[in-house]
Amino acid sequence: MPRPDISFQDLGPGRCAAQRETSATGRALARWRHAHRTRHRRSQPRLLGHRAIAGRRLGRHRRGTLGADAGARARAGAHALEVDVTDQASVAGALREVAERHGRVDLVVNAASPYGGSRSGPFGGGPLAEAGPSGFEDWSAMPVRGAFAFLSASARFLADQGGEATVVQVTGGSSRRAMAGRGLWAAGAFGVRALTQAAALELRAQGIHVALLVVDAVIDRSGGDDAGSADPASLADAVAYLAGQSPRAMTHELQVTPALDQWVP
């Protein structure tokens, strides 16, 4: 089974955290943190002083490197950590390293998309009647395994740490509904949603806010302003909104969709 390498960014004091297939969301979080730390100290008091991790999935030929993004990360005060998001010990080790470097961790975000197998054939696995023996492992198993390792390691770490914190698990619109020909893809997303709901119920009483961020959209990383797609900066704002909530009014599932994209309630 291929190892889903994730490059974590340790964003240091006053930072937040993410993991994603590309570095765009993590980079947007770093930029958001820098802007709000320097310009919005009064409007976002709960987010100041946050420590966490942000990052991306590494390609086969980009193992252990930040590539062209290294300069931007350096300017944001970021530090790269490589971790296997499907391994509890690896995720826990990354959290401990951030805590040892900066102190308590207040926000952890997982937007990684680990997949296994060859994923040959139609996107999403194709019709069930035509699915091969490895279809479930190819399209369904790894996202759930990644959410399990991330949520369980984060829950244990934050419960031991004590105090309020926020955990955001990112998924797609398939977590809310299946589509013909993409049932295997949706099965993985449904599993991610179920584990996130369970974590939210288990950790609420300890002041740990767990939320599912459903990005029901195509993500445009080009830097354009197409209102038919989502962009990393807007997703970073959504994470910040969740992290800034009071324990008296927690949102446990937030769906975001662009204005010009089709919205399915």
Image: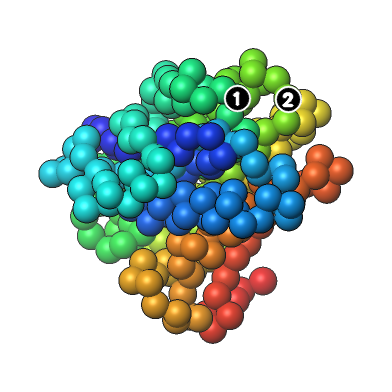
What's the amino acid at mark 2?
A: Gly
Q: Which residue is outermost to the front? A: 38
- What's the image's color scheme? rainbow
What's the amino acid at mark 1?
A: Arg
Q: Which residue is outermost to the bottom? A: 260
Q: CA distance from mark 1 to mark 2?
A: 9 Å
Q: What residue appears at the point 26 percent right and 33 percent down from the top-left corner?
A: 3
Category of crowding for the residue at label 2, using alpha-carbon neighbours closer than 10 angstroms: few (below 14), some (14–19), many (at least 20): few
Q: Nearer the viewer, residue 63 or 169?
A: 63
Q: Which mark is residue 27?
A: none
Q: Nearer the viewer, residue 228 or 16?
A: 16
From the image, tell me which residue sits under label 2: 163
Residue 136: image location, x then y, percent: 36, 44
From the image, tell me which residue sits under label 1: 104
Category of crowding for the residue at label 1, using alpha-carbon neighbours closer than 10 angstroms: few (below 14), some (14–19), many (at least 20): many
Q: What residue appears at the point 41 percent right and 52 percent down from the top-left corner?
A: 27
Residue 16: image location, x then y, percent: 54, 42
Q: Nearer the viewer, residue 71 or 180?
A: 71
Marks 1/2 in contact by CB < 8 Å: the verdict is: yes
Q: Quadrant of residue 197?
A: top right
Please state, as top left, top right, bottom left or bottom right, where the C terminus lies in the image.
bottom right
Above or below, comparing residue 92 to residue 173 in the picture: above
Above or below, comparing residue 243 to residue 129 in the picture: above
Above or below, comparing residue 108 to residue 68 in the picture: above
